[in-house]
Protein backbone atom coordinates (compact mmCIF):
# COMPACT_ATOMS: atom_id res chain seq x y z
CA UNK A 1 0.00 0.00 0.00
CA UNK A 2 1.04 3.54 -0.57
CA UNK A 3 1.71 6.02 2.15
CA UNK A 4 1.07 9.76 2.30
CA UNK A 5 3.77 12.42 2.48
CA UNK A 6 3.56 15.67 4.38
CA UNK A 7 6.03 18.40 3.48
CA UNK A 8 6.57 21.17 6.02
CA UNK A 9 8.56 24.35 5.35
CA UNK A 10 10.90 22.71 2.88
CA UNK A 11 13.77 24.85 1.60
CA UNK A 12 16.51 23.69 -0.74
CA UNK A 13 19.68 25.21 -2.11
CA UNK A 14 22.23 24.42 -4.80
CA UNK A 15 25.25 26.34 -3.57
CA UNK A 16 23.90 29.84 -3.00
CA UNK A 17 20.97 29.31 -5.33
CA UNK A 18 17.79 29.09 -3.26
CA UNK A 19 15.86 26.69 -5.50
CA UNK A 20 12.94 25.80 -3.21
CA UNK A 21 11.33 28.24 -0.80
CA UNK A 22 8.95 27.35 2.03
CA UNK A 23 7.11 24.48 0.38
CA UNK A 24 4.16 23.11 2.36
CA UNK A 25 2.22 20.28 0.85
CA UNK A 26 0.22 17.18 1.65
CA UNK A 27 0.54 14.34 -0.81
CA UNK A 28 -2.29 11.84 -0.24
CA UNK A 29 -1.63 8.11 -0.25
CA UNK A 30 -2.67 5.98 -3.25
CA UNK A 31 -3.32 8.93 -5.49
CA UNK A 32 -1.34 10.44 -8.31
CA UNK A 33 -0.15 13.97 -7.66
CA UNK A 34 1.13 16.00 -10.59
CA UNK A 35 3.60 18.86 -10.33
CA UNK A 36 3.58 21.37 -13.16
CA UNK A 37 5.42 24.61 -13.84
CA UNK A 38 7.92 26.17 -16.24
CA UNK A 39 11.48 24.83 -16.60
CA UNK A 40 13.73 25.66 -13.68
CA UNK A 41 10.87 26.29 -11.25
CA UNK A 42 12.05 23.66 -8.77
CA UNK A 43 9.73 20.71 -9.53
CA UNK A 44 12.57 18.26 -10.04
CA UNK A 45 14.47 19.53 -7.02
CA UNK A 46 11.30 19.06 -5.01
CA UNK A 47 10.81 15.41 -5.90
CA UNK A 48 14.51 14.77 -5.34
CA UNK A 49 14.04 16.09 -1.79
CA UNK A 50 11.37 13.45 -1.19
CA UNK A 51 13.85 10.56 -1.44
CA UNK A 52 16.96 12.50 -0.39
CA UNK A 53 18.51 12.26 -3.85
CA UNK A 54 18.96 16.03 -3.70
CA UNK A 55 21.83 15.64 -1.24
CA UNK A 56 23.85 13.36 -3.54
CA UNK A 57 25.02 16.62 -5.10
CA UNK A 58 27.83 17.87 -2.85
CA UNK A 59 26.80 21.53 -3.06
CA UNK A 60 23.14 20.86 -2.25
CA UNK A 61 21.50 21.67 1.08
CA UNK A 62 18.04 21.20 2.53
CA UNK A 63 16.04 22.40 5.56
CA UNK A 64 12.52 21.64 6.74
CA UNK A 65 10.59 18.46 7.31
CA UNK A 66 9.37 15.70 5.06
CA UNK A 67 7.05 13.38 6.99
CA UNK A 68 6.60 9.93 5.56
CA UNK A 69 3.75 8.65 7.70
CA UNK A 70 5.19 9.17 11.16
CA UNK A 71 8.75 9.16 9.95
CA UNK A 72 10.74 12.37 9.44
CA UNK A 73 12.98 11.27 6.58
CA UNK A 74 15.66 13.86 7.35
CA UNK A 75 15.78 13.08 11.08
CA UNK A 76 14.80 9.49 11.66
CA UNK A 77 16.52 7.43 9.01
CA UNK A 78 19.42 7.03 6.62
CA UNK A 79 19.16 8.07 2.96
CA UNK A 80 19.50 4.48 1.72
CA UNK A 81 16.52 3.37 3.82
CA UNK A 82 14.20 6.05 2.52
CA UNK A 83 15.29 5.46 -1.07
CA UNK A 84 14.21 1.84 -0.77
CA UNK A 85 10.75 2.96 0.27
CA UNK A 86 10.47 5.82 -2.24
CA UNK A 87 11.23 4.62 -5.75
CA UNK A 88 12.24 6.98 -8.53
CA UNK A 89 11.92 7.03 -12.31
CA UNK A 90 14.04 9.57 -14.16
CA UNK A 91 13.46 11.75 -17.16
CA UNK A 92 15.70 9.75 -19.46
CA UNK A 93 15.53 5.97 -19.26
CA UNK A 94 18.68 4.83 -17.45
CA UNK A 95 18.90 1.03 -17.40
CA UNK A 96 22.23 -0.44 -16.33
CA UNK A 97 23.87 -0.97 -19.73
CA UNK A 98 25.99 -4.01 -18.85
CA UNK A 99 23.17 -5.92 -17.18
CA UNK A 100 20.56 -8.20 -18.70
CA UNK A 101 16.89 -7.26 -18.52
CA UNK A 102 16.51 -9.72 -15.65
CA UNK A 103 19.46 -8.33 -13.70
CA UNK A 104 18.25 -4.78 -14.25
CA UNK A 105 14.94 -5.56 -12.60
CA UNK A 106 16.41 -7.31 -9.59
CA UNK A 107 19.44 -5.01 -9.26
CA UNK A 108 17.97 -3.14 -6.31
CA UNK A 109 17.29 -6.34 -4.42
CA UNK A 110 20.54 -8.10 -5.29
CA UNK A 111 22.67 -5.10 -4.41
CA UNK A 112 20.94 -4.87 -1.08
CA UNK A 113 21.94 -8.44 -0.32
CA UNK A 114 18.78 -10.32 -1.32
CA UNK A 115 19.75 -13.75 -2.68
CA UNK A 116 16.72 -16.07 -2.71
CA UNK A 117 16.73 -17.10 -6.36
CA UNK A 118 13.18 -18.42 -6.66
CA UNK A 119 11.73 -15.41 -4.93
CA UNK A 120 13.80 -13.14 -7.20
CA UNK A 121 12.38 -14.82 -10.29
CA UNK A 122 8.86 -14.30 -9.06
CA UNK A 123 9.54 -10.67 -8.20
CA UNK A 124 11.07 -10.04 -11.62
CA UNK A 125 8.04 -11.47 -13.39
CA UNK A 126 5.60 -9.60 -11.16
CA UNK A 127 7.45 -6.30 -11.59
CA UNK A 128 7.65 -6.68 -15.36
CA UNK A 129 3.95 -7.55 -15.52
CA UNK A 130 3.16 -4.52 -13.36
CA UNK A 131 5.11 -2.30 -15.71
CA UNK A 132 3.40 -3.88 -18.75
CA UNK A 133 6.68 -5.06 -20.24
CA UNK A 134 6.56 -8.79 -19.49
CA UNK A 135 5.03 -9.97 -22.76
CA UNK A 136 7.57 -8.04 -24.82
CA UNK A 137 10.69 -9.29 -23.05
CA UNK A 138 9.88 -12.62 -21.42
CA UNK A 139 11.80 -14.60 -24.06
CA UNK A 140 15.12 -12.78 -23.71
CA UNK A 141 15.18 -11.87 -20.04
CA UNK A 142 18.71 -13.07 -19.49
CA UNK A 143 20.00 -12.87 -23.05
CA UNK A 144 19.52 -9.22 -23.88
CA UNK A 145 20.99 -6.13 -22.28
CA UNK A 146 18.64 -3.55 -20.83
CA UNK A 147 20.18 -1.05 -23.24
CA UNK A 148 19.05 -3.06 -26.27
CA UNK A 149 15.38 -2.19 -25.72
CA UNK A 150 13.59 0.76 -27.31
CA UNK A 151 13.30 4.00 -25.37
CA UNK A 152 9.74 3.35 -24.24
CA UNK A 153 10.59 -0.21 -23.23
CA UNK A 154 13.65 1.02 -21.35
CA UNK A 155 11.50 3.43 -19.37
CA UNK A 156 9.06 0.66 -18.47
CA UNK A 157 12.08 -1.46 -17.51
CA UNK A 158 13.18 1.35 -15.19
CA UNK A 159 9.69 1.41 -13.68
CA UNK A 160 9.87 -2.36 -13.15
CA UNK A 161 13.29 -1.90 -11.54
CA UNK A 162 11.86 0.69 -9.17
CA UNK A 163 8.82 -1.48 -8.36
CA UNK A 164 10.92 -4.58 -7.65
CA UNK A 165 12.21 -3.19 -4.34
CA UNK A 166 8.56 -2.83 -3.30
CA UNK A 167 8.40 0.88 -2.51
CA UNK A 168 5.39 2.68 -1.08
CA UNK A 169 5.86 5.82 -3.14
CA UNK A 170 6.90 6.21 -6.76
CA UNK A 171 8.43 9.51 -7.87
CA UNK A 172 8.41 10.12 -11.61
CA UNK A 173 10.43 13.01 -12.95
CA UNK A 174 9.01 13.72 -16.42
CA UNK A 175 8.94 9.99 -17.17
CA UNK A 176 7.51 10.39 -20.66
CA UNK A 177 9.25 13.51 -21.91
CA UNK A 178 11.81 11.53 -23.92
CA UNK A 179 9.22 9.14 -25.39
CA UNK A 180 6.96 9.03 -28.43
CA UNK A 181 3.15 9.33 -28.07
CA UNK A 182 2.50 5.57 -28.11
CA UNK A 183 5.02 4.89 -25.35
CA UNK A 184 3.72 7.92 -23.46
CA UNK A 185 0.19 6.62 -23.43
CA UNK A 186 1.46 3.23 -22.23
CA UNK A 187 3.22 4.94 -19.32
CA UNK A 188 0.09 6.91 -18.51
CA UNK A 189 -2.07 3.76 -18.51
CA UNK A 190 0.50 2.29 -16.19
CA UNK A 191 0.30 5.19 -13.76
CA UNK A 192 -3.45 4.64 -13.64
CA UNK A 193 -3.03 1.02 -12.64
CA UNK A 194 -0.19 1.63 -10.20
CA UNK A 195 -2.16 4.18 -8.20
CA UNK A 196 -4.05 1.45 -6.39
CA UNK A 197 -0.82 0.13 -4.89
CA UNK A 198 1.49 3.12 -4.71
CA UNK A 199 1.45 6.81 -4.00
CA UNK A 200 2.60 8.51 -7.17
CA UNK A 201 4.19 11.91 -7.62
CA UNK A 202 4.72 12.87 -11.25
CA UNK A 203 6.56 15.89 -12.56
CA UNK A 204 5.40 16.84 -16.03
CA UNK A 205 5.68 19.57 -18.60
CA UNK A 206 2.66 18.26 -20.37
CA UNK A 207 -0.49 19.75 -18.85
CA UNK A 208 -2.80 17.34 -20.64
CA UNK A 209 -0.83 14.56 -19.06
CA UNK A 210 -1.32 16.03 -15.60
CA UNK A 211 -5.03 16.38 -16.30
CA UNK A 212 -5.24 12.77 -17.51
CA UNK A 213 -3.45 10.94 -14.73
CA UNK A 214 -3.53 12.98 -11.52
CA UNK A 215 -6.22 13.69 -8.93
CA UNK A 216 -4.25 16.59 -7.48
CA UNK A 217 -1.96 19.09 -9.10
CA UNK A 218 0.56 21.55 -7.71
CA UNK A 219 1.79 24.55 -9.67
CA UNK A 220 5.39 25.63 -9.06
CA UNK A 221 6.90 28.97 -10.06
CA UNK A 222 10.34 30.36 -9.25
CA UNK A 223 10.99 27.94 -6.41
CA UNK A 224 7.63 28.44 -4.70
CA UNK A 225 4.46 26.44 -4.83
CA UNK A 226 1.84 28.84 -6.06
CA UNK A 227 -1.20 26.64 -5.80
CA UNK A 228 -2.14 23.11 -4.88
CA UNK A 229 -5.62 21.74 -5.44
CA UNK A 230 -7.62 19.07 -7.17
CA UNK A 231 -6.56 18.74 -10.77
CA UNK A 232 -10.06 19.61 -11.91
CA UNK A 233 -10.02 22.87 -9.97
CA UNK A 234 -6.53 23.83 -11.12
CA UNK A 235 -7.43 23.37 -14.76
CA UNK A 236 -10.92 24.84 -14.73
CA UNK A 237 -11.00 27.44 -12.01
CA UNK A 238 -7.58 28.19 -10.49
CA UNK A 239 -7.51 30.54 -7.50
CA UNK A 240 -4.28 32.25 -8.44
CA UNK A 241 -3.87 34.52 -11.45
CA UNK A 242 -0.37 33.14 -12.16
CA UNK A 243 -1.70 29.57 -12.35
CA UNK A 244 -4.34 30.68 -14.78
CA UNK A 245 -1.79 32.51 -16.92
CA UNK A 246 0.40 29.42 -17.03
CA UNK A 247 -2.26 26.86 -17.91
CA UNK A 248 -3.80 29.11 -20.53
CA UNK A 249 -0.37 29.43 -22.11
CA UNK A 250 0.23 33.09 -21.44
CA UNK A 251 3.76 32.31 -20.28
CA UNK A 252 6.08 29.38 -19.67
CA UNK B 1 22.24 27.52 -62.57
CA UNK B 2 22.58 23.80 -63.31
CA UNK B 3 26.20 24.07 -64.49
CA UNK B 4 27.32 25.95 -61.39
CA UNK B 5 25.56 23.40 -59.19
CA UNK B 6 27.29 20.60 -61.04
CA UNK B 7 30.63 22.28 -60.54
CA UNK B 8 30.01 22.70 -56.82
CA UNK B 9 29.01 19.06 -56.52
CA UNK B 10 32.23 18.09 -58.25
CA UNK B 11 34.28 20.24 -55.89
CA UNK B 12 32.51 18.71 -52.89
CA UNK B 13 33.14 15.22 -54.21
CA UNK B 14 36.79 16.13 -54.75
CA UNK B 15 37.22 17.42 -51.19
CA UNK B 16 35.44 14.36 -49.88
CA UNK B 17 37.75 12.08 -51.83
CA UNK B 18 40.83 13.95 -50.64
CA UNK B 19 39.72 13.76 -46.98
CA UNK B 20 38.97 10.05 -47.25
CA UNK B 21 42.33 9.51 -48.92
CA UNK B 22 44.15 11.33 -46.12
CA UNK B 23 42.34 9.23 -43.53
CA UNK B 24 43.32 6.02 -45.31
CA UNK B 25 46.96 7.13 -45.59
CA UNK B 26 47.04 8.02 -41.88
CA UNK B 27 45.62 4.62 -41.01
CA UNK B 28 48.30 2.92 -43.08
CA UNK B 29 50.99 5.01 -41.41
CA UNK B 30 49.72 3.91 -38.00
CA UNK B 31 49.68 0.23 -38.90
CA UNK B 32 52.83 0.21 -41.05
CA UNK B 33 55.50 0.33 -38.29
CA UNK B 34 53.98 -2.62 -36.43
CA UNK B 35 53.63 -4.66 -39.61
CA UNK B 36 57.18 -3.75 -40.67
CA UNK B 37 58.64 -4.78 -37.32
CA UNK B 38 56.66 -7.99 -37.33
CA UNK B 39 57.68 -8.83 -40.89
CA UNK B 40 61.35 -8.13 -40.19
CA UNK B 41 61.26 -10.27 -37.04
CA UNK B 42 59.63 -13.08 -39.00
CA UNK B 43 62.29 -12.79 -41.68
CA UNK B 44 65.20 -12.76 -39.22
CA UNK B 45 63.85 -14.95 -36.43
CA UNK B 46 61.54 -17.56 -37.88
CA UNK B 47 64.38 -19.67 -39.30
CA UNK B 48 65.96 -20.05 -35.84
CA UNK B 49 62.74 -21.14 -34.21
CA UNK B 50 62.51 -24.80 -33.41
CA UNK B 51 60.84 -26.98 -30.88
CA UNK B 52 64.04 -26.87 -28.83
CA UNK B 53 63.74 -23.11 -28.53
CA UNK B 54 60.65 -23.59 -26.33
CA UNK B 55 61.90 -26.63 -24.38
CA UNK B 56 65.66 -26.17 -23.88
CA UNK B 57 67.66 -23.79 -21.76
CA UNK B 58 70.62 -21.84 -23.21
CA UNK B 59 73.72 -23.84 -24.09
CA UNK B 60 77.28 -22.69 -23.42
CA UNK B 61 79.00 -20.61 -26.08
CA UNK B 62 80.20 -22.69 -28.98
CA UNK B 63 77.60 -25.40 -28.69
CA UNK B 64 74.87 -25.20 -31.29
CA UNK B 65 71.17 -25.20 -30.40
CA UNK B 66 69.72 -24.37 -27.03
CA UNK B 67 66.57 -22.38 -26.35
CA UNK B 68 64.93 -19.88 -24.12
CA UNK B 69 62.45 -22.02 -22.21
CA UNK B 70 63.71 -20.67 -18.89
CA UNK B 71 63.41 -17.08 -20.11
CA UNK B 72 59.84 -17.59 -21.33
CA UNK B 73 58.83 -19.12 -18.00
CA UNK B 74 60.76 -16.41 -16.14
CA UNK B 75 58.99 -13.64 -18.02
CA UNK B 76 55.70 -15.31 -17.15
CA UNK B 77 56.58 -15.38 -13.45
CA UNK B 78 57.82 -11.77 -13.45
CA UNK B 79 54.72 -10.53 -15.26
CA UNK B 80 52.47 -12.48 -12.89
CA UNK B 81 54.10 -10.83 -9.87
CA UNK B 82 53.99 -7.45 -11.62
CA UNK B 83 50.30 -7.80 -12.47
CA UNK B 84 49.46 -8.96 -8.93
CA UNK B 85 50.99 -5.75 -7.64
CA UNK B 86 50.18 -3.27 -10.40
CA UNK B 87 46.59 -4.21 -11.29
CA UNK B 88 44.92 -4.12 -7.84
CA UNK B 89 46.81 -1.03 -6.66
CA UNK B 90 46.24 0.73 -9.97
CA UNK B 91 42.52 -0.06 -10.14
CA UNK B 92 42.07 0.83 -6.46
CA UNK B 93 43.83 4.15 -7.01
CA UNK B 94 41.73 4.85 -10.10
CA UNK B 95 38.52 4.16 -8.18
CA UNK B 96 39.66 6.53 -5.45
CA UNK B 97 40.48 9.26 -7.97
CA UNK B 98 37.20 9.00 -9.87
CA UNK B 99 34.70 8.17 -7.14
CA UNK B 100 35.71 8.88 -3.57
CA UNK B 101 38.40 11.53 -3.70
CA UNK B 102 37.05 13.67 -6.52
CA UNK B 103 38.10 17.29 -6.04
CA UNK B 104 40.11 16.63 -2.86
CA UNK B 105 43.74 17.67 -2.35
CA UNK B 106 44.64 14.04 -1.75
CA UNK B 107 43.24 13.08 -5.18
CA UNK B 108 45.15 15.86 -6.90
CA UNK B 109 48.35 14.74 -5.18
CA UNK B 110 47.76 11.10 -6.18
CA UNK B 111 46.99 12.06 -9.78
CA UNK B 112 50.13 14.21 -10.00
CA UNK B 113 52.26 11.45 -8.49
CA UNK B 114 50.89 8.89 -10.93
CA UNK B 115 51.66 11.16 -13.88
CA UNK B 116 55.21 11.77 -12.68
CA UNK B 117 55.68 8.05 -12.02
CA UNK B 118 54.55 7.39 -15.57
CA UNK B 119 57.34 9.62 -16.83
CA UNK B 120 60.12 8.08 -14.74
CA UNK B 121 62.59 6.30 -17.07
CA UNK B 122 62.42 2.55 -16.62
CA UNK B 123 66.14 2.27 -15.81
CA UNK B 124 65.58 4.64 -12.87
CA UNK B 125 62.77 2.40 -11.70
CA UNK B 126 65.20 -0.53 -11.80
CA UNK B 127 67.79 1.36 -9.74
CA UNK B 128 65.15 2.45 -7.21
CA UNK B 129 63.94 -1.10 -6.66
CA UNK B 130 67.57 -2.24 -6.58
CA UNK B 131 68.32 0.04 -3.64
CA UNK B 132 64.99 -0.68 -1.92
CA UNK B 133 64.93 -4.48 -2.19
CA UNK B 134 68.05 -5.96 -3.76
CA UNK B 135 70.59 -4.13 -1.57
CA UNK B 136 68.88 -4.82 1.78
CA UNK B 137 68.38 -8.47 0.80
CA UNK B 138 71.88 -8.81 -0.52
CA UNK B 139 70.96 -10.64 -3.74
CA UNK B 140 69.12 -10.23 -7.03
CA UNK B 141 65.71 -11.87 -7.10
CA UNK B 142 62.65 -12.62 -9.20
CA UNK B 143 60.58 -10.86 -6.57
CA UNK B 144 62.43 -7.55 -6.96
CA UNK B 145 62.05 -7.77 -10.74
CA UNK B 146 58.32 -8.37 -10.41
CA UNK B 147 58.02 -5.43 -8.01
CA UNK B 148 59.79 -3.15 -10.48
CA UNK B 149 57.41 -4.18 -13.28
CA UNK B 150 54.42 -3.86 -10.94
CA UNK B 151 55.32 -0.30 -9.95
CA UNK B 152 55.65 0.57 -13.62
CA UNK B 153 52.14 -0.76 -14.29
CA UNK B 154 50.47 1.27 -11.53
CA UNK B 155 50.24 4.72 -13.16
CA UNK B 156 48.88 3.44 -16.49
CA UNK B 157 46.27 1.23 -14.83
CA UNK B 158 45.37 3.96 -12.35
CA UNK B 159 44.82 6.74 -14.86
CA UNK B 160 42.94 4.65 -17.43
CA UNK B 161 40.70 3.30 -14.65
CA UNK B 162 39.96 6.84 -13.53
CA UNK B 163 39.17 7.99 -17.05
CA UNK B 164 36.96 5.00 -17.82
CA UNK B 165 35.00 5.46 -14.57
CA UNK B 166 34.44 9.15 -15.33
CA UNK B 167 32.94 8.13 -18.66
CA UNK B 168 30.14 6.18 -16.96
CA UNK B 169 27.04 8.40 -17.28
CA UNK B 170 25.85 10.18 -14.16
CA UNK B 171 22.36 8.79 -14.82
CA UNK B 172 23.61 5.24 -14.22
CA UNK B 173 25.03 6.17 -10.79
CA UNK B 174 21.82 7.98 -9.89
CA UNK B 175 19.76 4.96 -10.88
CA UNK B 176 21.69 2.81 -8.41
CA UNK B 177 21.53 5.36 -5.59
CA UNK B 178 17.79 5.86 -6.10
CA UNK B 179 17.29 2.13 -5.48
CA UNK B 180 18.67 2.57 -1.98
CA UNK B 181 22.03 1.00 -2.82
CA UNK B 182 24.85 2.31 -0.59
CA UNK B 183 27.37 4.43 -2.45
CA UNK B 184 30.36 2.07 -2.04
CA UNK B 185 28.29 -0.82 -3.36
CA UNK B 186 26.96 1.20 -6.25
CA UNK B 187 30.53 2.14 -7.19
CA UNK B 188 31.82 -1.43 -7.13
CA UNK B 189 28.82 -3.27 -8.58
CA UNK B 190 27.53 -0.69 -11.06
CA UNK B 191 30.09 1.95 -12.00
CA UNK B 192 33.18 -0.27 -12.08
CA UNK B 193 31.25 -3.04 -13.83
CA UNK B 194 29.95 -0.64 -16.46
CA UNK B 195 33.48 0.64 -17.08
CA UNK B 196 35.14 -2.78 -16.93
CA UNK B 197 35.86 -3.22 -20.68
CA UNK B 198 37.86 0.02 -20.64
CA UNK B 199 39.58 -0.84 -17.38
CA UNK B 200 40.64 -4.22 -18.79
CA UNK B 201 42.03 -2.50 -21.87
CA UNK B 202 44.06 -0.24 -19.58
CA UNK B 203 45.45 -3.24 -17.72
CA UNK B 204 46.40 -4.97 -20.97
CA UNK B 205 48.11 -1.79 -22.15
CA UNK B 206 50.20 -1.67 -18.98
CA UNK B 207 50.90 -5.41 -19.20
CA UNK B 208 52.05 -5.21 -22.81
CA UNK B 209 54.24 -2.23 -22.03
CA UNK B 210 56.16 -3.82 -19.16
CA UNK B 211 56.31 -7.25 -20.85
CA UNK B 212 59.03 -5.92 -23.12
CA UNK B 213 60.92 -3.93 -20.48
CA UNK B 214 64.60 -4.76 -20.12
CA UNK B 215 66.07 -1.87 -18.16
CA UNK B 216 64.20 -2.33 -14.85
CA UNK B 217 65.20 -6.00 -14.80
CA UNK B 218 68.95 -5.54 -15.23
CA UNK B 219 69.44 -4.54 -11.57
CA UNK B 220 66.65 -6.67 -10.14
CA UNK B 221 65.81 -9.99 -11.82
CA UNK B 222 69.35 -9.97 -13.25
CA UNK B 223 68.86 -12.90 -15.59
CA UNK B 224 69.73 -16.54 -15.28
CA UNK B 225 71.12 -19.05 -17.79
CA UNK B 226 69.36 -21.94 -16.06
CA UNK B 227 65.99 -22.81 -14.60
CA UNK B 228 64.79 -21.05 -11.52
CA UNK B 229 61.41 -20.99 -9.89
CA UNK B 230 62.65 -19.64 -6.57
CA UNK B 231 61.39 -16.09 -6.18
CA UNK B 232 64.39 -15.07 -4.10
CA UNK B 233 66.89 -16.09 -6.77
CA UNK B 234 67.83 -14.34 -9.99
CA UNK B 235 65.52 -15.33 -12.81
CA UNK B 236 65.70 -15.24 -16.61
CA UNK B 237 63.43 -12.99 -18.66
CA UNK B 238 62.91 -12.87 -22.41
CA UNK B 239 63.84 -9.19 -22.89
CA UNK B 240 66.97 -9.66 -20.76
CA UNK B 241 67.97 -12.76 -22.66
CA UNK B 242 67.46 -11.00 -25.97
CA UNK B 243 69.58 -8.11 -24.74
CA UNK B 244 72.42 -10.37 -23.57
CA UNK B 245 72.37 -12.38 -26.81
CA UNK B 246 72.09 -9.37 -29.05
CA UNK B 247 75.17 -7.61 -27.66
CA UNK B 248 77.22 -10.81 -27.66
CA UNK B 249 79.77 -11.38 -30.44
CA UNK B 250 78.43 -14.81 -31.46
CA UNK B 251 76.37 -15.39 -34.62
CA UNK B 252 74.49 -18.29 -33.07
CA UNK B 253 73.37 -16.07 -30.19
CA UNK B 254 72.36 -13.28 -32.59
CA UNK B 255 70.05 -15.67 -34.38
CA UNK B 256 68.53 -16.79 -31.09
CA UNK B 257 68.03 -13.14 -30.09
CA UNK B 258 65.97 -12.56 -33.25
CA UNK B 259 63.92 -15.64 -32.52
CA UNK B 260 63.44 -14.44 -28.93
CA UNK B 261 62.19 -11.05 -30.09
CA UNK B 262 59.71 -12.74 -32.41
CA UNK B 263 58.47 -15.01 -29.61
CA UNK B 264 58.17 -12.07 -27.23
CA UNK B 265 55.92 -10.11 -29.62
CA UNK B 266 53.80 -13.15 -30.44
CA UNK B 267 53.36 -13.96 -26.74
CA UNK B 268 52.30 -10.38 -25.90
CA UNK B 269 49.79 -10.27 -28.76
CA UNK B 270 48.46 -13.70 -27.77
CA UNK B 271 48.08 -12.78 -24.10
CA UNK B 272 46.27 -9.53 -24.91
CA UNK B 273 43.95 -11.18 -27.44
CA UNK B 274 43.20 -14.02 -25.04
CA UNK B 275 42.19 -11.67 -22.23
CA UNK B 276 40.03 -9.69 -24.64
CA UNK B 277 38.34 -12.81 -25.91
CA UNK B 278 37.69 -14.23 -22.45
CA UNK B 279 36.33 -10.96 -21.08
CA UNK B 280 34.14 -10.30 -24.12
CA UNK B 281 32.34 -13.63 -23.91
CA UNK B 282 30.05 -12.55 -21.08
CA UNK B 283 28.86 -9.43 -22.88
CA UNK B 284 25.14 -9.38 -23.62
CA UNK B 285 23.37 -8.63 -26.85
CA UNK B 286 22.96 -4.89 -27.29
CA UNK B 287 25.14 -3.92 -24.32
CA UNK B 288 26.98 -0.72 -25.00
Image: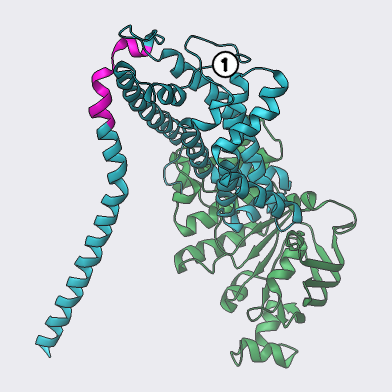
Up/down of A207 relative to B264, above or below: below
Task: State the image coordinates of residue B177 (x, y, percent, origin top left).
Answer: 69, 52
Residue in front for this viewpoint, B81 or A111? B81
Magenta residues (range) = B41-54
- Locate residue A251 relative to residue B76 in the image: left or right: right
What quarter of the picture does the N terminus of chain B occupy?
bottom left
Q: Residue furthest left?
A: B3
Up/down of A147 relative to B202, above or below: below
Up/down of A145 relative to B73, above or below: below
Residue in front for this viewpoint, A142 or B211? B211
Determine whether the residue tagged by mark 1 lies in a helix, strand or loop: loop
Task: State the image coordinates of residue B268 (x, y, percent, origin top left).
Answer: 41, 30
Q: Which residue is labeled 1 in the image?
A: B234
Q: Is residue B34 visible?
A: yes
Q: Is residue A121 magenta?
A: no
- Locate residue A209 relative to residue B185 in the image: left or right: left
- Identity of the residue drawn at 40% across and 11% down: B58
Q: Main secondary structure of the magenta part?
A: helix
Quarter location, residue A47: bottom right
Display colour scheme = by chain
Task: State the image coordinates of residue A28 (x, y, percent, origin top left).
Answer: 78, 65
Mark 1 residue crowding within 10 angstroms, few (<14) / some (14–19) / many (20+): many
Residue in front for this viewpoint, B201 or A248? B201
- The colour one sees for chain A in the rendered image is green
Q: Residue furthest front?
A: B249
- Identity of the residue drawn at 26% across and 28% down: B42
Task: State the image coordinates of residue B201 (x, y, percent, origin top left).
Answer: 48, 41
Q: Is residue A126 visible?
A: no
Number of callouts in the render? 1
- The colour one sees for chain B in the rendered image is cyan
Amino acid sequence: MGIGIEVINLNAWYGTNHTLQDINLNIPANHATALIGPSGCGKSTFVRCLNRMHETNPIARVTGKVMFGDLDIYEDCKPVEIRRRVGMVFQRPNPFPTMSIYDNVCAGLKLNGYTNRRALEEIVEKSLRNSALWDEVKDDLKKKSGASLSGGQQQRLCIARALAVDPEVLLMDEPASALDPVSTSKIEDLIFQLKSQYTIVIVTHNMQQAARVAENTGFFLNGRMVEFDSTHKIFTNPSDKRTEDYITGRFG
Amino acid sequence: MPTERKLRAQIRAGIDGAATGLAVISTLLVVAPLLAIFAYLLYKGASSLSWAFFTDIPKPVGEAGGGMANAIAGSGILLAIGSLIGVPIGIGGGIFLAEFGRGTKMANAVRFTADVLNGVPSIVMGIAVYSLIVVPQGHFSALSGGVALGIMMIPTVCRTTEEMLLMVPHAVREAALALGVPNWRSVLAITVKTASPGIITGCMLAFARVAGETAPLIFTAFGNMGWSSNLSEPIAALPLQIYVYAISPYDEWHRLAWAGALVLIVLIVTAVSLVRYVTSRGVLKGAS
